[in-house]
Image (cartoon, helix red, strand yellow):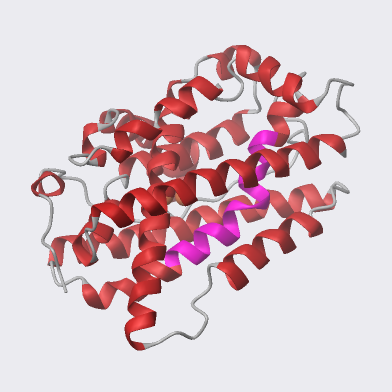
Amino acid sequence: MTTGVPATYRDEALAITARNVRFDWAGVPVQYIPGDAYATQFWNVMHLVLPEGERAMADVFARALPLVDDPRLHEEVVGFVGQEATHAGAHESFRRYLQAHDVDVAAHVSRIEYIVGQVFGDHGLTGRAGRFWLRERLGLYAAAEHFTAVVGEWLLDNEPFDRRGVDPTMLDLLRWHGAEELEHRNVAYDAFQYVDGSYARRVRTAFVAFAGLATLWFSTTARLYRDDPGRTRRWWPLAYLGSARTSMIPSLTFLAKQIPPYLHPRFHPSSMGDIGKAVRYLAQSPAARAAQS
Ligand SMILES: [Fe+2]
Ligand SMILES: [Fe+2]
């Protein structure tokens, strides 16, 4: 069943644990990126779409736990499942805040519920078919986690947010989430490699995950932007380019550059980015510090 654990993950000394964070949204503007409706809607996708996706992912990895005999990886997967469930809860709390401010989220939530429940749900499969489908979904989520880790690091690095005056509570949510994505960047990949490890499956599921994520993210942002009373009259692709030019969202070039490394046969997430940034941010994040005390 197992194909072994990559040596690289053993070198990461951090324990992955969920932090019981809370965010107080009182007084946070609905357009929390001043003067940029498109970028605000781009990040709103995290509040509207990610909670269901993260819970579905946590469920798939929890199902894979009995297949992970390695005690260190087992413990990391447990921590990863806990962190993703916490992310879902934190974003959902802002989703409720948006609803209280008359933002209609129902259509977006039903769409993601359909995708994770009807398309990527477990369909009651058992035996050989159940094992195949579990491996496929581990591959899909491992690829998605590659993107959440690189975008997480982008969020930590992105100083233009501070200069623009993005609401500090929202910035802490985005960066706390980004830091934990960077912190647990190895886990989904290592679990996929341990349970399956097929290179063909890694590549195949990566293409599906990258195309699916891009379609979901850009189409949801476009709809949210269309319905935003604070929007400008710019067509959304031009609004995207404008927001990317001012670094309120990642550019297409940045996103496209993240794909080839994942497809390399010897890829491992520990080769990407600087995990020290996550550790440093989590040590000073107001929400993470409050959770600790
Ligand atoms: Fe997450
Ligand atoms: Fe994650």
The residue drawn where x is 34% and y is 88% is 127
The residue drawn where x is 16% and y is 43% is 12
Q: How many marks?
A: 0
Residue 293 seen from this side: no
Q: Position of residue 279 (x, y in %)?
A: 30, 35
Q: Position of residue 131 (x, y in %)?
A: 33, 77
Taking the image as shown, residue 258 lies to the left or right of residue 27, namely: left
- Where's the N terminus, which quadrant? bottom left
Of helix, strand and loop, which mostly describes the magenta segment?
Answer: helix
- In the image, 210 versus 52, the foreground residue is 210
- In the image, 16 versus 10, the foreground residue is 10
Q: Position of residue 274 (x, y in %)?
A: 27, 28
Q: Position of residue 255 (x, y in %)?
A: 48, 28
The residue drawn where x is 23% and y is 67% is 195
**Residue 206 lies within the magenta run:** no
Q: Which residues are magenta?
A: 42-58
